[in-house]
């Protein structure tokens, strides 16, 4: 803002898509106008337990929603449109301009989310120019990519023209015949381009990206040589690839069965809009395709990324209700794994091979090409647009760095290039490029239901559960601040060298500490019979204390859940076995020497604790029953440590159930 006051400048703020592949979301800002370019989603990485979808943090847009004049969509891939329906629940976008296919796919998502009334969808054709707000006019330049109906953008602003490539490669023989409108790029290059924002996905790969058509003969060879069924997996959104596979099925006399929701949806949409031509009778419902000879069957399905719930993954695990692998099957992976998915993909391939199928995969087979240009494509883009300033986008950090080197090799001075991160602000004037004060950026995680947001706290808890397990603890504390029963500690998924008794002692110590040091703050005598106690606060203090201790003593960080059961005032205090100064206090019971029990006592000690646990009734209901462990319990035969834990666990559960 301060910079804006100094000198009018164009601000370009990516909220996603940098230092990553996914959730591309870019904000263009001039004066009072905000224009959005794309709003995608990303898929969760390992450790994001139960997270379905990753969105960028859009606090900045929520705060500035009054200034949003419209959105531009470059193409229909999920990493460019997957966030829009979700964002529309939070802020309005007056109008969205985009390609027909992308908007058709977006409509489905918006209907599902119930946000159709939140915006107006405007379809564009190649070379259309749309005006957004007072300051932006955008020309849609046809480009080539793995998705049909894709565009690069020429964005004219008061400070100059910006070329925003969107996802692209230079494919001179595109499957749908829609060639890259290079003449328009050259036109803008000739007029003068202030800044180029260019796709960096394959900046590390030398050469030109092979044309999409080049996979046709390779797929043809594998399909025509197959004796049994052909099973192919690819991205449903790779419209050109799917179109070629349908063409090959027709050519090889095979009927097509489709599996996977997105495969069915995208093909239906693309056929309806004329992006794919295939006769209706090419398709056979999956239930009937089993009646056809294997040699006349081609199954096209989702699962190319090893997604656990996708059709091919389920087939590989023998969990699909309709399709089982046969040894005569030829299974073709016509896609390469997105970096984070490599392990699940190779696991799927292994399982399919173990079931006896022939699996065709990998780079050498010529059955997949990328939709993103390589270094030479990127050079051609730079050569045509001749930008003064350059910002590599759509890529992980090393890809951005590599792309910047390519630009330098083409004569763009290093000081005219900015490598930025999500939330960074690129400030452009006719003769300068600089980074402004960054805005809030981050991630928002949607739960499997897509209804709830998995915030940082929930995610941390899930990670703790998965990594270190959970410890629950029941503390019985009377309203006058005394521990009325020994804490019950219960472990799930926790691996620790400490024995249960030790944990129980630690829990006692933390409770004692909180009662001695925090009780004053946490309870307030309001004049009534019993003081007002902030039980949640007590609980939190105990959790924090135990957490610190476990981290310090055992280097584990399980999730700790402390439940405090209040007991009436006057309940006799339970004399803990653990003390802050063990040696100075009397032995807890049984007349042994005081202090913290040594490990040699293990065979006896846990028994007593078990007994105590078993003997302790719900103290609130029966305060007098604060445990004085029955001596008989000491005689309980010793058990080994492990069954003991489960024994404790069972007991706790039944106690909890009661
Ligand atoms: Zn794309
Ligand atoms: Zn993309």
Image (cartoon, grey):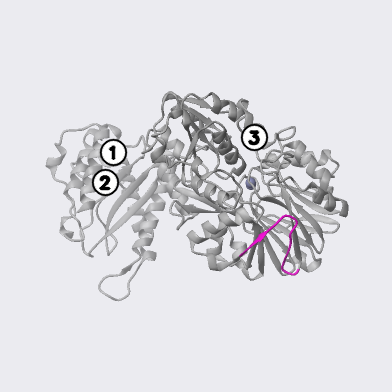
Residue for point 84% across, 52% down: 187
- Alpha-carbon neighbours of circle 2 within 10 Å: few (<14), some, or many (≥20)? many
Residue for point 64% across, 47% down: 148
Q: Which residue is mark 3?
A: 369
User: Counting residues from the N terminus, which is met first, the one under dot 2 or under dot 1?
Assistant: 2
**Is residue 387 toward the left or the right of residue 572 in the image?**
right
Examine the image and state in which quarter residue 554 appears.
top left
Helix, strand or loop at label 1? It is: loop
Mark whose residue sits in front, 3 or 2: 3
Name the one closer to the observer, 312 or 569.
312
Examine the image and state in which quarter residue 252 appears.
top right
Asked whether residue 642 is in view, the answer is: yes
**Is residue 548 toward the left or the right of residue 370 in the image?**
left
**Is residue 264 toward the left or the right of residue 485 in the image?**
right
User: Counting residues from the N terminus, which is met first, the one under dot 3 or under dot 2?
Assistant: 3
- Name the mark on residue 577: 2
CB of mark 3 near ligand 1 (< 8 Å): no
Q: CA distance from mark 2 to mark 1?
A: 9 Å
Question: Which residue extends farthest bottom?
Answer: 527
Name the one closer to the observer, 479 or 302.
302
Q: Which residue is mark 1?
A: 597
Residue 171 in magenta stretch:
no
Q: CA distance from mark 3 to mark 2?
A: 68 Å
Residue 125 in magenta stretch:
yes
User: Counting residues from the N terminus, which is met first, the one under dot 1 or under dot 3?
Assistant: 3
The span picked out in magenta is 121-134
């Amino acid at each position: 803002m301060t910079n804006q006051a100094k000198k009018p400048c164009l601000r370009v703020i990516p909220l996603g898509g940098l230092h990553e592949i996914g959730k591309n979301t870019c904000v263009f800002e001039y004066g009072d106008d905000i224009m959005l370019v794309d709003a995608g989603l990303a898929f969760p990485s390992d450790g994001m337990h139960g997270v379905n979808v990753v969105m960028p943090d859009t606090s900045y847009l929520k705060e500035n929603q009054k200034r949003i004049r419209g959105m531009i969509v470059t193409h229909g891939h999920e990493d460019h449109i997957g966030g829009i329906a979700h964002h529309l629940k939070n802020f309005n976008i007056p109008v969205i301009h985009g390609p027909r296919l992308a908007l058709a796919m977006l409509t489905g998502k918006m209907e599902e989310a119930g946000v159709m009334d939140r915006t107006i969808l405007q379809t564009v054709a190649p070379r259309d120019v749309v005006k957004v707000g007072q300051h932006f006019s955008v020309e849609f330049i046809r480009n080539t990519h793995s998705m049909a109906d894709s565009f690069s953008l020429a964005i004219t602003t008061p400070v100059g023209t910006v070329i925003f490539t969107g996802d692209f490669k230079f494919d001179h023989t595109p499957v749908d015949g829609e060639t890259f409108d290079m003449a328009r790029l050259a036109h803008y290059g000739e007029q003068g381009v202030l800044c180029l924002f260019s796709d960096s996905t394959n900046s590390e790969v030398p050469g030109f990206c092979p044309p999409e058509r080049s996979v046709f003969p390779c797929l043809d060879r594998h399909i025509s040589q197959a004796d049994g069924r052909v099973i192919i997996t690819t991205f449903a959104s790779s419209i050109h690839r799917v179109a070629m596979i349908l063409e090959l099925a027709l050519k090889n006399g095979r009927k097509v069965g489709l599996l996977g929701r997105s495969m069915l949806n995208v093909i239906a949409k693309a056929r309806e809009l004329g992006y794919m031509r295939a006769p209706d009778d090419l398709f056979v419902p999956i239930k009937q395709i089993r009646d056809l000879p294997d040699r006349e069957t081609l199954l096209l399905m989702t699962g190319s990324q090893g997604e656990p719930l996708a059709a091919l993954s389920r087939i590989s695990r023998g969990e699909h209700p309709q399709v089982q692998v046969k040894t005569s099957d030829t299974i073709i992976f016509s896609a390469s794994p997105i970096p984070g998915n490599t392990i699940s993909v190779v696991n799927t391939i292994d399982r399919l091979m173990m079931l006896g199928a022939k699996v065709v995969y990998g780079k050498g087979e010529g059955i997949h090409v990328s939709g993103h240009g390589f270094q030479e494509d990127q050079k051609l883009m730079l050569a045509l647009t001749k930008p003064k300033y350059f910002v590599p986008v759509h890529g992980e950090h090393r890809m951005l760095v590599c792309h910047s080197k390519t630009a330098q090799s083409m004569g763009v001075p290093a000081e005219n290039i900015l490598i930025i991160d999500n939330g960074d602000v690129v400030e452009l004037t006719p003769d300068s490029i600089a980074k402004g004060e960054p805005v809030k950026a981050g991630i928002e995680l949607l739960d499997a239901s897509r209804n709830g947001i998995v915030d940082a706290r929930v995610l941390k808890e899930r990670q703790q559960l998965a990594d270190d397990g959970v410890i629950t603890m029941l503390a019985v504390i009377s309203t006058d601040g005394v521990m009325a029963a020994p804490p019950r500690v219960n472990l799930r998924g926790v691996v620790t060298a400490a024995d249960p008794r030790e944990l129980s002692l630690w829990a006692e110590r933390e409770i004692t500490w909180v009662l001695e040091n925090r009780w004053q703050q946490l309870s307030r005598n309001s004049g009534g019979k019993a003081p007002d106690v902030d039980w949640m606060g007590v609980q939190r203090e105990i959790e924090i204390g135990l957490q610190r201790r476990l981290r310090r003593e055992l280097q584990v960080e399980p999730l700790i859940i402390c439940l405090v059961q209040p007991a009436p005032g006057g309940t006799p205090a339970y004399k803990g076995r653990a003390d802050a100064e063990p040696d100075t206090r009397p032995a807890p019971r049984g007349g042994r020497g005081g202090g913290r029990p040594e490990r040699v006592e293990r065979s006896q000690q846990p028994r007593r604790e078990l007994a105590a646990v078993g003997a302790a009734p719900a103290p609130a209901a029966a305060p007098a029953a604060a445990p004085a462990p029955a001596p008989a319990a000491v005689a309980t035969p010793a058990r080994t440590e492990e069954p003991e834990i489960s024994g404790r666990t069972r007991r706790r559960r039944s106690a909890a159930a009661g």
